[in-house]
Image (cartoon, rainbow, N blue to C red):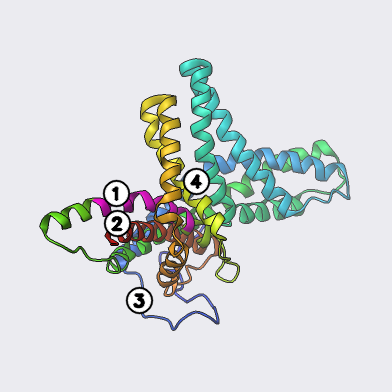
């Protein structure tokens, strides 16, 4: 695999996009993106090897069994997602059981379920699942004779799937890592712009201190809703991005705050999780995340942040950058809107 430290910096074509700026990433950021890409590519290799071996053997046997197998790249992509998810759950459950028995297995499966859900979301929405599935499907189609025998197809598919998926995993992992680093940098660059829009403190010294404390708390409580809303919006193209209804926006706010409350309450055991979740849900329902202008403000911040984004050279890198950037910008916007709510008279 050939790694380019300086991909072409052309802007993504869009008739509605504002005029391009001359901003280009510097040497430090380009290097950081390359390091992130290499690290993510290396991490992708072991799981891709396992996934490709299993899927290649299974799909290869199916191809060898019938000339009219009807196997598509989309089907292979779905199989890779299922295997990836199952693999993580099985390993987590087994490790938890060995350490603490059934209780440990249950806790480990719950934690892994949340992590795996996030991984699968990024795998699918980031475009890696489609890229991996397409690569494996092309390799299997070129190497396996349809109708040549299930055993023969399975044996060839095992090797072909392992090699093709490992190569594709390293390549897409490199793009994922570059995109994630770029998205983090882009989101961090928006902190100053976002907070410059925040309402200023007013009143005498004690009043300003009280408003600052209230604004910080309100902002932290609204940030998860902004993060989730930014994630939802940035995982869709600007053309396909639709405005959520008021009820769905409130559901997003309540869901994000409930999850945060439950996570904080986990320190107090099952009862703490329950109480934290209920308290978080109430905050999400009554806080800034359910305000009428919340979604519009987050969307405006996201549009501003993405208007001078550059084409990173691959679809996977662009999507990962957009998702990570959107989540970060959404969190900053949510914090700012929560702060503003506390400054209102």
SS class, disc 2: helix
N-term mark: 4 or 3: 3
**Which stretch did the figure color magenta?**
214-229
Near mark 3 (Cα within 10 A), the count class, few <14, some 14-19 or many ≥20, is: few
Inter-mark Cα distance, 1 to 2: 9 Å
Taking depth in this image into account, of 224 and 8 the one nearest to the observer is: 224
Kindly indicate whether the residue at mark 2 contacts the one at mark 1 (C-beta within 8 angstroms): yes
Q: Which residue is mark 1?
A: 217
User: How far from the left and from the top, in percent, is residue 70?
Assistant: 83, 51
| Quarter assignment of residue 94 | top right
Inter-mark Cα distance, 4 to 3: 37 Å
Q: Nearer the viewer, mark 2 or mark 3?
A: 2
Inter-mark Cα distance, 2 to 3: 35 Å
Inter-mark Cα distance, 2 to 4: 22 Å
| Quarter assignment of residue 329 | bottom left
**Residue at horizontal 43%, vertical 62%?**
294
């Amino acid at each position: 695999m050939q790694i380019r430290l300086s991909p072409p910096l052309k802007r993504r074509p869009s008739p509605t996009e504002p005029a391009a700026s001359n901003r280009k990433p510097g040497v430090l950021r380009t290097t950081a993106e390359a390091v992130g890409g290499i690290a993510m590519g290396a991490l992708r290799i072991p799981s891709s090897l396992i996934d490709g071996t299993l899927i290649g053997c299974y799909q290869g046997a199916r191809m060898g069994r019938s000339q009219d197998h009807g196997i598509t790249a989309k089907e292979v992509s779905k199989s890779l997602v299922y295997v990836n998810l199952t693999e993580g759950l099985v390993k987590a459950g087994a490790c938890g059981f060995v350490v603490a028995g059934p209780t440990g297995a249950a806790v480990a499966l719950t934690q892994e379920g949340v992590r795996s859900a996030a991984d699968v979301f990024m795998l699918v929405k980031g475009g890696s699942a489609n890229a991996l599935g397409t690569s494996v499907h092309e390799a299997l189609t070129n190497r396996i004779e349809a109708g040549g025998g299930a055993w023969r197809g399975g044996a060839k598919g095992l090797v072909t799937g392992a090699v093709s998926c490992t190569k594709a995993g390293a390549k897409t992992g490199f793009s994922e890592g570059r995109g994630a680093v770029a998205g983090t940098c882009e989101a961090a660059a928006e902190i100053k712009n976002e907070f410059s829009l925040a309402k200023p403190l007013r009143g005498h010294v004690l009043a300003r201190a009280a408003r600052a404390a209230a604004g910080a708390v309100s902002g932290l409580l609204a940030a998860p809703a902004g993060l989730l809303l930014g994630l939802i919006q940035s995982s869709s193209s600007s053309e396909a991005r639709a405005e959520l209804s008021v009820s769905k926006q409130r559901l997003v706010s309540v869901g994000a705050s409930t999850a945060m409350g439950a996570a904080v309450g986990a320190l107090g055991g099952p009862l703490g999780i329950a109480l934290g979740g209920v308290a978080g849900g109430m905050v999400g329902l009554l806080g800034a995340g359910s305000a009428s202008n919340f979604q519009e403000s987050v969307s405006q911040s996201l549009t501003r942040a993405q208007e001078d984004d550059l084409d990173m050279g691959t679809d996977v890198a662009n999507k990962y950058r957009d998702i990570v950037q959107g989540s970060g910008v959404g969190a900053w916007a949510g914090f700012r809107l929560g702060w503003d709510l506390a400054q209102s008279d």
